[in-house]
Amino acid sequence: MGGIGHFVIDDTTTSLDNAYNGGGGFIVGLGFRIMPMLALEANWMASFQSTSVQTNLGSMPVNTIHSLNLDAKIFYLPWSQRIEPYIQVGVGAYMLAETFAYELSGFGFDIGGGVDIRLTDSLGIGLKALYRGFYVDNTDDDYYVYLQREAAFVDSITAEATLQFYF
């Protein structure tokens, strides 16, 4: 479990990229070390985003970017007992939501790296940075009403700090 900073990269080609100004939130996960060089993690991220869109419906409310991901962590110094740097790749389901009332969902991936630092045999901290890219489709009239109708690939970066418990 931990905290995140989440920044959407504005590539100016879609209103979805322009709408989100960045924010922060939390991440909760569970992992399993399969072998010394490989671990699998499942996690849920909730990132609360400030927004900057004005429409005929008023200003767009604060939104949340949610993700459910399955990630592989590849440790490139598996013999290290206390400091464990890694590369991480994964796939997941993403959802842009306003208190789950209006939602856009799609699939994406993440890639990045980090380091896990064991403080004791059962407690550690982790730091990582990930690129997260995901596709959402807002072309159906029943979807999100604050943004223009479009399908978009959203690029973002997260910086994460976690508290880890080892069993």
Image: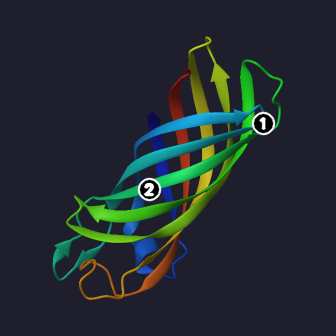
Local secondary structure at mark 1: loop
| Residue shown at the point (62%, 40%) measured from the top left | 128
Q: Quadrant of residue 51?
A: bottom left
The residue type indicated by label 1 comes to: Met
Q: Residues within 10 Å of mark 2 (few under 14, many from 20)?
A: many
Residue 103 is situated, as x and y percent measured from the top left of the image, at 29, 69
The residue type indicated by label 2 comes to: Ser
Question: Residue placed farthest to the top in the image?
Answer: 120
Quadrant assignment for the N terminus: top left
Can residue 133 be seen here? The reply is no
Residue 112 is situated, as x and y percent measured from the top left of the image, at 67, 50
Q: What distance separates the C-alpha of mark 1 from that of mark 2?
A: 25 Å
Instruction: Point out which mark residue 67 bears.
Output: 2
Can residue 167 be seen here? The reply is yes
Local secondary structure at mark 2: strand
Q: Nearer the viewer, mark 1 or mark 2?
A: 1
